[in-house]
Amino acid sequence: MNLLKFFSASLTNPFQYLFMGTAGTYSKLHQDNGGLAITISPIVGSKEVVMVHRDDHMCLYYGEADVNEPDLHRFPMLSHARIWKTTVSPGEILLMPQGTFHQVRNKTNCLSYSCFHLDTLNLPAFIQSFMDNDAPEIDHRATLWNAGTDLISNVDELTDKAERETQRGGQVPKLTKGNVEVVETLRKLRHSIREFEVRMRAQRAIVDDVNEGVHEYEWGKLVEVRRTDEERRQRGQPGA
């Protein structure tokens, strides 16, 4: 599940692009901030992609080392870098984990689709990106808040449907693969939001309201209110 679809109220991932270029067009080795994974999908033509593990930055000599023609006399640590090279063609999708150093070259005239991706695997990096403020174009807070509230509503609807069927004497609907994914994602997101709240409190303790609008999200209430409702139901008390 790509959580970036919750970036805005339109439920559309805004970080998706079409790239078009002639054969030989290329980008230099670089690393994208934001804590997001990246997908590359050629529509017409093919791309050569060289990737270096995100933890091997010290082996790249601030981008001066050439991973295509390594000069181990000038850049000896390059021999320790974990480097992958592949060609991506139409019908294939390359997923690069967050923070991967990469360079891309069109092997032919090429039209390709690319988008950023956020799921439970890179949530810790996404939160760290917000704390580092390394990608101000990404509204980390809105993404987490919108994803949390939408997934909670999804689970509530599923629970309400099961309760209605039980009250009518019917069978409880079976969980689908999509239902399980929503619940698992929400559990991981809940823990991430708690960590996010802790870091935000620490940030405010140093400088009040470091980021504009920081107080409009009451993260503690978002992750705790459902537990309260659950306890009320267990005790036979009406919900809020």
Image: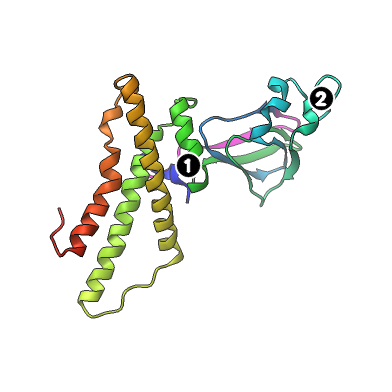
Mark 1 surroundings: few (<14), some (14-19) or many (≥20) residues within 10 A: some
Q: Is residue 25 located in the magenta-colored stretch of the structure? A: yes
* Residue 223, position as x, y percentages in the image: 30, 46
Q: Is residue 23 visible?
A: yes
The type of residue carrying mark 1 is Leu
Question: Which residue is located at x 20 percent, y 75 percent?
Answer: 167
* Region in magenta: 11-26
- Between 84 and 103, the one lying in front of the other is 84
Q: Is residue 67 visible?
A: no
Residue at which label 2 appears: 76
Question: Which residue is located at x 37 percent, y 41 percent?
Answer: 193
* Residue 46, position as x, y percentages in the image: 72, 42
Give the structural element (helix, strand or loop) at label 2.
helix
Quarter of the view holding residue 37: top right
Quarter of the view holding residue 108: top right
Side of 141 where 79 appears, left or right: right
The type of residue carrying mark 2 is Pro
Seen in the picture, residue 195 relative to 202 is either above or below; the reply is: below
* Residue 185, position as x, y percentages in the image: 43, 52
Give the structural element (helix, strand or loop) at label 1.
helix
Residue at which label 1 appears: 123
Question: Which residue is located at x 51 percent, y 32 percent?
Answer: 34
The image's mark for residue 174 is none
Side of 20 where 132 appears, left or right: left
**Separation of residues labelled 1 and 2 (CA atoms):** 34 Å
Q: Is residue 169 located in the magenta-colored stretch of the structure? A: no
* Residue 23, position as x, y percentages in the image: 75, 33
Q: Between disc 1 and disc 2, whose residue precedes? A: 2
Side of 6 where 217 appears, left or right: left
